[in-house]
Amino acid sequence: MNHGQGDDQERELFARLEADLNNSPPRPEPADPIGDVIGIGSAPSARPDREDGSADRDPTGSADSHPTESGGESADRLADPDAVVLVDQPTPKGSAPGYWDAARRARRRAIIPGWVRSGEELRAAVGWAAGYAGHVAAFHAVRTPLYAVRLAARSPQGAVKAVSTTGRWLADAEGAPLRRWAVAEANAAEYFRLARMRDRRVKLRAVLFGLGSLIGLTVALALYVLAPTWVTVAAGAAAVFALGWLGAPADAPVIHRAVERPKADKLTSDMVLRALGALGITGINQAQSKGGPGLAFTAPITRDGPGWRAEGDLPHGVTVTDVIDRRERLASALRRPLGCVWPEAVPEEHTGHLVLWVGDQDMSKATAPAWPLARTGAVNLFRPVPWGTDQRGRWVNLTLMYLAGIIGAIPRMGKTFLLRLLLLIAALDPRAELHTYDLKGTGDLDPVGDRVSHRHRAGDEEEDIEYILAGLREVRAEMRRRTKVIRSLPRDICPESKVTSELADRKDLGLHPIVIGVDECQVLFEHAKHGAEFEEICTDLVKRGPATGIVLLLATQRPDAKSLPTGISANAGARWCLKVMSQVENDMVLGTSSYKRGIRATMFAWGDKGICYFVGEGADARIVRGVFADAVAADTIALRARATRLLAGTLTGHAAGEEMETTAGPGYDLLADILAVMPEPKAWNETVAGRLASLRPEVYSGWGPEQLTAALKPFGIATGQVWGRTEGGKGANRRGIERAHITAAITKRDEGRGAA
Ligand SMILES: Nc1ncnc2c1ncn2[C@@H]1O[C@H](COP(=O)(O)OP(=O)(O)OP(=O)(O)O)[C@@H](O)[C@H]1O
């Protein structure tokens, strides 16, 4: 940072201060050299800026109570010595923190930078450096012939330049103007002195030139006669290239750059201070108008990933949230795109401690590193898995087990993509049983649902709601069973009373992970008939599910108390908040007081798709951009997950074609029910539907022929034209079922179960 306008000005200022002090009447010496008469009525004092830029900051923190800073009123008070009020008392001996206390509390900087210690980041850095060097080498290697031609073409100009420069040197051309001046001024003595000097110089240079030429010619002749041809050719080429290099005009270099450097400027303290001053924050403006910097830097501005990081204390009373609120203005003042400018609070510091990270590229446009799981690899849900990158491009991990999570955002910001990504991660653990419910009904979760899920439904019609209710009831019953299993296990096998990866591996215990993902969950909680039951089940799953290996992930575009009941939002262990519009939604997703603490998803721009505040994984809120996996990529990953499941024998439910068991409600089996009501080999759909309704009205009442056709489809049973008779005895062809198809489907299903 450029402190002050120059040494002269600084010296002048000190001189004036010294003069003022010498002329002013003597003042009584304060008892304490630092923390005393800084109350109203004490004599004004001016202090030059400190090196770290924290000018005007009193070490006691009481600079604001200084009389010169409290307006003209202090002048009146100064006249009346009785009005002096000592604001800061002398510090009792021994109460101020000593050097060792301060040293004990000091934050230690890493001896070896974090990126060197992290194997992944080191590998990435070394890989990048090798790639960069390789690119530059290949770029120039390909162009070498072109460079040779260019140099050869310019060598005649180079030769002329070399001859003329040598001639000027030999003739001492640089002294000519002085000699001409002596002639013009008729200064004979000076002219003769210069002429003598020139003669001496020319003589010496002529000798040097003669010697050089002799040696050069001898070497050239020796090379020509004695050296192998290739050495002669190489030497000749080197001479031609050297002349070509010499002859190259300054505006047309022989070699061009192999890379286009981005135009992002280095972040300097002046830029930061100027930008902060342009935000219109009174505290900063006041501090700067008094000659202070407006931000006391606590660390040098350093390169941090693909950007710059500045860190410091804002003036007293100004908080980081004041700056975050004006992020757009800050970006304008720094002349950077909005997606490059990320002011952040540091949770363990005071609320005025600002960390400003300015990226080289807009976070939403920066090329994200390839997701390690995109093409290969399986997942252990009990271990951390990368799911997104932070502003610096570092991977952010998530351990899906033992948590319940909520995702909130306004529409079109990437909520469904994020939920699908998390479900894809779950799908890649072949032990995990997935329940995917897409209440938006556009089929965004189908790649996972149809390929892998045990339960899957897209839509918000009554039958979909019934299906989901049945599924959630089933999971809650399963959770109760699991609690009993966990309780019955010996302490040494289950020391923490929760499911572990080893326990999940044991098929006899049935403690495999269950991951439930619900998109637009507000549809469930706002449902007129079943809303209360959904809320009750989900609250229970959020509270007790994580320990029993059940993970509930809820996404909503309206995170208010009605669409995301507080019992759920308050107990969620992981939170993802993409752009929201107000404090209420922000705090609903990220937790109470988040907005006040500066964790504000309202600051995300419309273009920040897939970028969210993430709270979880034992860390405070971080800004993360989720991996972008579109429907095609999701399909590929889901197919891989399905193949792994088929190998492991863990493909069940919807994805294995066992859909309607649950549609009919827990404990009921559609295929068995049809066999029970259909003694004849063939029957019309309407007849079977009517009989089913009589058998179990609570499940099948209201079913028509189309519904029965749809319900049988997942089992691979097609309905066709069947001959029958109406009640009046009239023969007709109508849509119907064949008993043999039902029996075959039951046999196939039972075989599949046996294999699993
Ligand atoms: N991680 C990401 N990176 C970049 N773009 C993304 C990312 N995630 C989502 N998007 C973009 O955002 C768009 C909206 O995503 P998505 O459908 O998930 O939004 P949504 O919040 O679920 O919207 P709605 O509420 O309408 O369902 C997508 O079409 C996609 O192009």
Image (cartoon, rainbow, N blue to C red):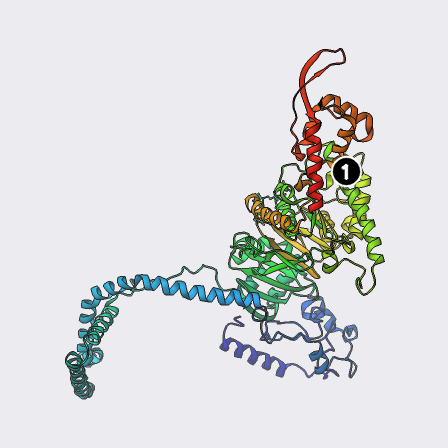
Find numbered disc 1 in the image and state the secondary structure of the residue it sits on. Answer: loop
Q: Quadrant of residue 317?
A: bottom right
Q: Nearer the viewer, residue 415 or 288?
A: 415
The x and y percentages for residue 178 are 22, 80
Q: Nearer the viewer, residue 722 or 710?
A: 722
Query: In which of the image's four quarters is ligand 1 placed?
Result: top right
In the rendered structure, the answer to whether residue 574 lies left or right of residue 175 reads: right
Q: Amino acid at mark 1?
A: Glu
Residue at mark 1:
526
Q: Which residue occupies 54% across, 53% down?
A: 375
Tell me if residue 612 can be seen. Answer: yes
Q: Quadrant of residue 155?
A: bottom left
**Vertical placement of residue 539 versus 112, above or below:** above
In the rendered structure, the answer to whether residue 90 lies left or right of residue 12 reads: right
Q: Nearer the viewer, residue 92 or 131?
A: 131
Neighbours of disc 1 within 10 Å: few (<14), some (14-19), many (20+): some
**Vertical placement of residue 115 versus 380, above or below:** below
Q: Quadrant of residue 194?
A: bottom left
Q: Which residue occupies 76% across, 11% down?
A: 728
The x and y percentages for residue 363 are 55, 55
**Vertical placement of residue 709 versus 339, above or below:** above
